[in-house]
Structure formats: C-alpha cells, structure tokens
Amino acid sequence: MKRILLTWELGSGLGHVIPLSDLGQHLAEALGVDVWYCFQSLHPQLPPKLFRRMLQAPGLQPASKPITRPCTFSDMLHNVGFDHESHLHGGIRAWRDIFSLVKPDLLIGEFSPMALLAARGLSMARVQVGTGWHVPPPGHPIPAYRHLPCHDPEQQAAMEIDILKRVNHVLAGFNAPPMANLGEFFQEVDLTALSTTPEFDHFDRPEPPLYLGHSPARPRHLESPTWPPGDGARIFAYLKPFAGLTNLLRQLANGRHRVIIHAAEQAWDSARHFSGPNVVVSRQPVAIDSLADADLIISHAGHGLIHETLALGLPMLLLPLHREQQVNAGNARQVGAALSIDCTGPAADGTNFETAIKQLLEQPRFRQTAQACSRRLHPANCPGLKALSEPIAELLQ
Amino acid sequence: MKASLGQSILVTWENGPDWRHLMRLKPIVERLAERGHRLTLVARDLSQTQKVFPDLACLQPPQQPRPVRAHPQAGSLAEIMLNSGFDNSATVKRLCAAWQAIGELVRPDAVVMSFSPVALLAFQGQPIRQVLIDDGYSHPMASGRMPSLKPWQRRYADQQTGIESRVRKAVNDVLLEAGQPPIDELSELFQRVDSINLMTLPELDHSGPKAHAHYRGFSDPGGAPPPWPGPATRPRLFVYLRPFAGIGELLSRIGQLDWSILAIVPGHDPQLRERLSNRPNLHLTETPCDIYRAAREAQLGISAGGDTVGIMLLGATPVCIVPYHVEQYLSAWRAEKTGAAICAGTPARLPPRTEEIITALNQLAQNRDCRQQAGAFAARYQALDPEHELAAVVAEIEGGSPDCP
C-alpha cells in the first residue's frame, strides 16, 4: 500500500489543522492509501482516530537573534531555524529521521519549510498546499508580499545569499544537491495547490498555480446565537486581545447596534464585562452560516473568515494584528468589500472604530461588492482540496 | 535465558532536565547499539539528544497543544502528571494514541522509559518488554500516596487525594479502553512493567528506599585521569557544576584557598577562565575526566546534586551540595541525611549565595564526622561495579541474563 505523509510545521489554528486532516481522510478513502500525519500541534479538534497515525512534528529552533517585525518570506525563514547551521542541521536531521521511519511515497507539506528542505534529494514525490502566505513565488530575492511596503530588496537579497550559503553547506552534509537560490526548494515540488482564490493570494505570481479556493475549517462544536432585541444594525465580531480591544468593546456597547461577539480565549476576560442589553458575548465559536442576516462582520482579517464573510455577501471591518492579516486586509480592501484599521501596534487604543462602522453600514457599495463576490468565492463553487485526489493518484503511480 | 540480538528498542524521555537523563541513558543506549540492536529515541530535547546520539533516529515525543501548568511548582509526581496532560481523559488519550503511532512504526521488542509517564500508560498491555530507567523523583513507592517532592513543606491530604484521583481517572479511562484492568492507586501504574531500574542508591533516593526496584548506582563514563593543578601535597577539592549566575564569584572565592582545585564546569563562559588564570591552584575546564577517580582522589567535593553527589560519596569524599532547583534540593536533602554531605541554601532561594556555599564548605572541611560517614558510605558499596550494573540493565532490556564478564 502506498503511503502519504502530511506535514504541518508552522502557523496556528484550525485553518491548518482541519483542512489538512480532511484532505488526509479523503485521500485514505478515495485512493486506499496509508496516510500518516506529522503536525506541530496535536489539536483537540482533530478526529480521535487520526492520532493513531499522528507524529509530533519536530520543534523548530527559534532564531538566536530573531527579526522582531518580519516583513518578507526570508525574514520568516530566518526566524524559524534558517539563521544558524546547527538549527538547520537539527531540523533536517529530525525530518529525515521521520521520513526514514514512515517511508512515505509522497509528502504533502502545509507551511512546512524544514520538511520540504529535508526532502530535497530524496526520491519521494512532493506536494505543497496552503494559502499563498506559505508558498513563495520564484525569484531572487523572493518577491515581496502584497500590501507590505516595508521591505528593502537589497537588504533582503543579501540576507537570502547568506541563508543560502548556510543551507547549501548543511545540505551537502546530507548528500543533497545545492540550490541556486533560496526559494528553489519551494519551486521543485511536483505540485503546488493553493487553498485560496487569486484575489486573496498573498503574492503576485508570474504563473498562476492551481487555486483550490478557501477550505473551510469548522470546529466541531459551533453555536448559533440569537441577535439581541432591538432595531439596530446586526454586527458580529470575532475578537482577540489587542491594544484597542477595550476601546472597541466600549464603542460597540455604547452604540445602538445589536452585537454578537465571539471572544477568543485570551480576550474572554476583557470581553465578558461588556455583555448587556445590546451585546451578547460568546466564548464558543459561532457558526458563520448562522449569521447570514448580519449587516457587518468585524474580524482580525483571518484568511478563512474573510472568505466565509464574502461567501455570505457581507461587508467587513478588518482589524489586522500581524503581517499576514495585513496582507489579507489589503486584498479585501482592494476587492472593495472592506475597510481596515491597522491594529498591529499600541496606537489602536485611541482609534475611533465607530466612524468606520458607520461608513460600512451606510455606504451600500461595500455590501454590493461583497454580494457580487459571494457566489464566486463560496467554497461550494471552488474545487477544494478534494480536487487533489486525481493529481495525487497520478503522482503515486 | 539468552536474549536475541538485533531487537528493535524504543528509548523514551518525556520529562526532566536534559543532561541527567541523557547522561544516564547514554551508556545504556551505546551498549545496546554495540550489541546490534536497532534503536529509536523519542526525547524531550531533540537537539541535545541529536548531539549526544549523532547516529541514531531521534523523534519528538507527543506534546499537549497548549501545556497546562496547573501546578507550576509541582510538589508530587501526580502534580507533574497533571501538568503533562493527565488533567483530563481526552488529552491523555490523544497523547497515548500518538505514542502508539510511534510504536506502530518502530515495532519495538522493548521500550526503555526514562521519566515517561504517558509512554508508560500508552504501552500498557502490549506485548513489548517495558523497562524503567528512573530515579526516586520520577518513580514512586510501590503503594500508598505519591510521595512529596518537597517534604520540607506542609501537604494537605485532601488536596493530594483530589489530585491523585483526577490523574487516576484519566489513567483508568485509557486502561479500560485498551481492555486493561484499572488501577486502584496511581503508584500501581509504575509497577506494571517488566523491570524497574533506579539509577541511584537507596540512601540517595529522592522519595526514600524502595524494595521493589533494582538500584543500579551511577554510570561510569570513564575518561582521562583528573588534571589536578599544583603540587600533589595539597588537599584536593573536586568541583563539578553547571554554570549559574554565581559561578564566577564562587570560583574566585574558593580559588583563594590553599587547595588544589579541579573545577569541571561544562558550558562555562571562556572569559571566566581568563579571569581565573591568576589562580595556578585552580584548573577550570569544560572537559569531563574520570570522575570516579577524581572523587577517590579528592578530600572534598562540590556538586549541584544528582549523580555526581553519589559518585563523590562512593569515592568516600564528603560533598558540599549547591542545588539550583527544587529537584536537586530534594536529592541534597536526602544526601545530608547520610551525614556525609552538607547542603547550602534553602529551597526558598536557589541557587544559594556564595556566602552560604562558603559557609557550608567550611563546615564540611572542619567536620570529621562527615568524612567518616562518607567513608562508611563508600565501604557499604565497595562491591558495586558500574560495569556489572550496566550489563544487568542491558540484560533486563534484552530480556535475558547478563553476559558474564
């Protein structure tokens, strides 16, 4: 029986866990293959039977001198073990030990740079999946992310040459061929499939890859809360801790809108105090499908939630907290269905969120644009990860 | 019975600091590899383990997604287990399933576990020889409540009973699902193995002597003769410590003594050696030597606790113990009871201040009784042979009798 290993090394949350495990289960059923998983988190939302085929991914060595505000793909690589030969050697060796035990015929990597690098020179077929954030396009230096004006190409090129020297030196120790540029090991895979749409890719690419559309990552237990009574606009907000959280909660509680808030675990203590006649605060994840009658969604510009909001044809106020979310927010602005307020720093504390909320509710163009996107971006109308079974079957032959 | 060679052996280490577990496992693993067995290590600190075992496959043990530290200052093995995922059945079931996944790939004939409670639970009932390589910190008494790891502190019986019953419930949920009989007491889980090897001696066991275990003493890594500085007529002080904030000040102070001082401090700052270069009576090095011999040749020792304390006592050398953390303080607390060691500092502030260490060292130097007690300790274990014990442990793992030398 052919064997597939699915790996997930970096990033957090259900957006990685659920689609990848769904893909694994689908491939096991559709192709009759033996599927193994090597994830960085043994997430409680995964189906229990999967753990009998689950290995713990090796922890990547954090950089000795991390780049505190990473802006490029190579900054990210620097921060996850590519900064030092001993870190690279340890990471490659750890993955090679896993490969030698699992003996996969095919590797499917989701945000797994060290696993992909470790596979260089080995005979197994390779597929990379993920959103655009995880998969850089070709080029030296690796091209910049969309909507992130912070990078200096010369400095980045120099850093990539530096990293490349280290990588090639370490690869030689494993009898793997050297690379001509740092991004090469992402380009040499047999198949790249992105769980996104062209509008929400994080890079501009010279050649369009296989776009599968967003893969929903629904937790097992979802609530369908009831809107508070009244006649104000219906706003749903998914909130994490950030400098302006209390300020936003106060503005929502003091307004006339009817608000449902799903507070992430770390934001619960701050948010629960704002429960009131027009505000419901939930600790449990909320079924987005149940919010079709909402007027506005507020979120931190997570890739999945943006797609799910647009699938409902709703406008968005986006409050990005980190770089990836900044790119997502930039894409959503460009589409024309959202406004965004940068919340990556302490300045968010003094923000007037109400002005943006008013604009999004009163100007019909945001909702009209979202509705125009709705059908096209809806996961039901996209190929999805299951479309991979055919090309993967071919690779396994 | 003669054991078969070429077995698949899984070696696990889930909890506890790196050097102690790795150093204990090193001679065992190397001997097993020499004897032609296929070894797979699953170790908490992957990068250190890769360095110690450059030619063996090393994996990361299954970990909780968000570690719960309900008891950051754990005072019993049950509290450590609670922190390690035994706080609810679902978590520990996931972790056990992931351990069984490793078993599925490795197909071990034997699993050798060092402070690995989840692995211990995961492999229950499987036709795999199970061998523990532990000490009194990670292995409890045969029955009764889990011993306190902070015996100098008051414990509340109701609270301990509650914690143990939570952990026991999680354990029993896994056992019942695997068709195994449940346990009545948590300590019972640790008896359901083929061989229990404690890498210490009864007097130094953290939680007191245990009749149900094999005490194997301490491994002998061998090494070069100790490079004592200065004339051989001087009394000798053997220091074996890891770097800590006060190491420079401590070495400067003891360097003023008219002793020949050999200080092995792996990983120390090279500038420290330069600063101490004006002390010809003090040799500071990172390189370990034959520490059994150094212990025999020294008149006094300084150690942070653990195995080197035992080795110094086996060499009839009284020891001043400088614990860095509570586990070492507990081992020092036991060592003090032999009458051959003095512990510096208090558990409220570790590591101790230089002044406290110097005071303890002076007391030790002036106390003839300590020297006599160290001599008596060494005499009790005169027949203890690290090589013989290593062969015995290897035989337990292989499932046969030790080869006769």
Image (cartoon, grey):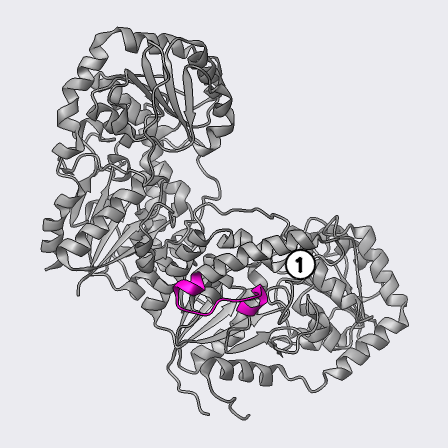
Tell me what residue is drawn at x 41 percent, y 41 percent.
A79
Q: Position of residue A163 (x, y in %)?
A: 35, 44
Q: Is residue A1 above or below residue A389?
A: below
Badge 1 amino acid: Glu
Q: Is residue B135 visible?
A: yes
Q: Is residue A344 above or below residue B291?
A: above
Q: Give the magenta part as a residue range.
A: B174-189
Nearer the observer, A394 or A126: A394
> In which chain is the residue bearing label 1?
B
Residue identified by numbered label 1: B327
Tell me what residue is drawn at x 50 percent, y 89 percent.
B401
The extreme front residue here reads: A229
Any magenta on residue B384? no
SS at mark 1 in the image: helix
Tell me what residue is drawn at x 80 percent, y 68 percent.
B337
In the shown orientation, is residue B265 left or right of residue B116?
right
